[in-house]
Amino acid sequence: MAAEDNKKLNQCVAYLTKVEIPVLKQTARKLSTLIENVDHLDARCLAHVIKSDPLMVVKLIRYLQQHRARQQAHQIMEVEQVLIMLGMDNALKNVSAKPYIEDLLGSDHREALVYLLKATHRAKVASAYAFDWAVRLHDLRYEEVRIAALLHDLAEMLMWCFAPKAMLQIKLIQTQNKTIRSQHIQEKVLGFPLYALQHALAAQWKLPELLIALMDDNHSDQQRVRNVFLAVNLARHAANGWDDAALPDDYEQIGQLLHLKPEEVMTIIGADK
């Protein structure tokens, strides 16, 4: 990347580090309902709501990383454990379920909001796939794999929030010319590819090293990283419809991961219904 591009990337990282990360209004409402019923509040229920919103998850993990004790050697990325480590009252007090994504984008950027909602839904679908496959592979750290898949496209979600016009321009160019690689379009419009922003943010925010490793597609030869990589790809392609041309290759690769035939893969993910 050229020096000017690095400058743009650094400016973006600095900006995203300074601003308050928004969350879905639905997440805030569900958390508020749980808090009102304080007698029945527990970490599992709270974690379930938080894990439905990738941006709320990264806010929580980032807060823990900023405030973890020096003697804490093990880095935690499981939401329920983070809540227990921080204390639920402390977490709810200091990790705000505001501002709302819907208010941030408002009526001026409704199209960008639609794309963002699609991206968050896709992330949740990918995390469910990754979790299921980790269990099938007897990976005892399945929850970490789930979170890595959930946050794999964090940079894209953040840019839909804070650079909606640029992201819509990228979408338009992709639609007009499907032969151009997404990375090249991102570099042209933003000055850097989204994967570079993802890695830069993870480093700046001191996210858990395991999380960074699991989100790194360059190490997809490793089983756990490949699990995340394939889950994200499947969720992205399936979002276009079960007739997407890339899906047969996905079934083949997932089958190799899980030691299943492509037809069996289609059955377990519900593609044959």
Image (cartoon, rainbow, N blue to C red):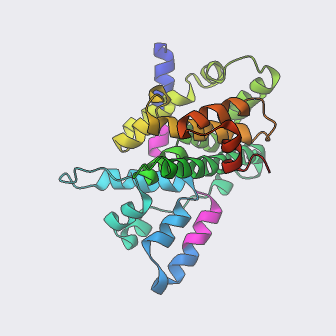
Query: Is 24 included in the stretch rendered in magenta?
Result: yes
Q: Quadrant of residue 84?
A: bottom left
Residue 36 shown left or right of residue 63 in the figure: right
Instruction: Compare residues 41 and 256 and report the one nearer the observer.
Output: 256
Instruction: Compare residues 232 and 28 and report the one nearer the observer.
Output: 232
Q: Position of residue 256 (x, y in %)?
A: 57, 33
Boundaries of the magenta span: 12-31
Residue 85 shown left or right of residue 14 in the figure: left
The kind of secondary structure the magenta stretch mainly shows is helix
Instruction: Compare residues 139 and 78 and report the one nearer the observer.
Output: 139
Which residue is at the far top? Answer: 2
Q: Quadrant of residue 254?
A: top right
Q: Which residue is painted at 50% across and 35% down in the image?
A: 226
The vertical placement of 196 against 205, above or below, is: above
Residue 20 in sight in this render: no
Q: Which residue is painted at 54% across and 42% down in the image?
A: 154
Q: Which residue is painted at 60% across and 40% down in the image?
A: 260
Q: Position of residue 152 (x, y in %)?
A: 53, 40
